[in-house]
Image (cartoon, rainbow, N blue to C red):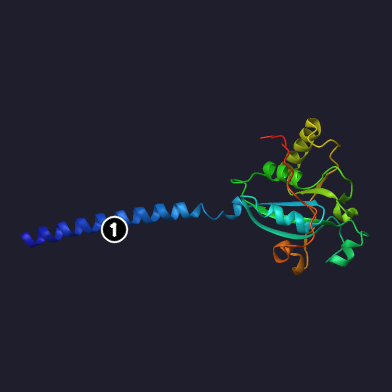
Amino acid sequence: MKLFLKLKHLVKISLSFLFCFLFIHTLAFSKNKNISPTKTQIEIAYLGGGCFWGMQDLLRTQKGVIKTEVGYMGDSTPSPKYELVKSGKTNFAETVMIQFNPQVLNYSELLSYFFKIHDPTTLNQQGNDIGVQYRSVIFYTSDHQKQIAEKLIDKINKSKVWKNPIVTKITPSQAWTKAEDYHQDYLQKNPQGYTCHFERQINIPNIN
């Protein structure tokens, strides 16, 4: 009888340890799930603001940005190459694709930074780069993105943060073509490479 009671006590203790272990493991797994965003937590933006090397190099540093790529958008010509785009004979824009977690960096905040790192008041030009391929453009992927872009541009114009009117185009996203490999993360591979992009110390109005 005593042996039976001891065994019963040991079983109870073992079960208690097992439940504690399972509870702690479940809690840890739940916390770890929040570290990597799920597909439903990832939003995509397409932004053009001049040479995509400088744009990507700055956008990729923002907290909440998961991945960036440079490529071409804005024309229906299939499989465009850099030589064609840089000729200015198409309607392609050098564009950055940004995957981001909207729970960390919302779309309005991303656009606010976008308006700090390029001059959105120069038509088809960014620094010494001139041509339609260097235009300032927001390719929206949803009505929500479109509405935010429109509201933010309206607020920026009214605030006179930029002395001249914003000429950034707001247009639906189109077929995306990833640029050649040597363009990807170019300034990381070539730290002394060309760029005309930098962060301005200006206060972009908040629409949140």
Left or right of 18? Residue 179 is: right
Of residues 179 and 24, the one drawn nearer to the viewer in this rendering: 179
Q: Quadrant of residue 108?
A: top right
Q: Quadrant of residue 174?
A: bottom right
Q: Position of residue 205 (x, y in %)?
A: 72, 34
Can you say which quadrant of the picture contains the C terminus?
top right
Query: In the orientation shown, which residue stands out farthest toward the right?
Result: 89
Mark 1, residue position: 18
Res 1 seen here? no
Give the answer, above or below, for where 159 lies relative to 34. Answer: above
Can you say which quadrant of the picture contains the N terminus?
bottom left
Of residues 89 and 200, the one drawn nearer to the viewer in this rendering: 200
Label 1 secondary element: helix
Q: Position of residue 102 (x, y in %)?
A: 62, 46
The residue at the point 89 percent across, 56 percent down is 91
Q: Residues within 10 Å of mark 1 (few under 14, many from 20)?
A: few
Q: Position of residue 196 (x, y in %)?
A: 80, 53
Query: In the orientation shown, which residue stands out farthest toward the bottom?
Result: 181
Query: In the orientation shown, which residue stands out farthest toward the top?
Result: 158
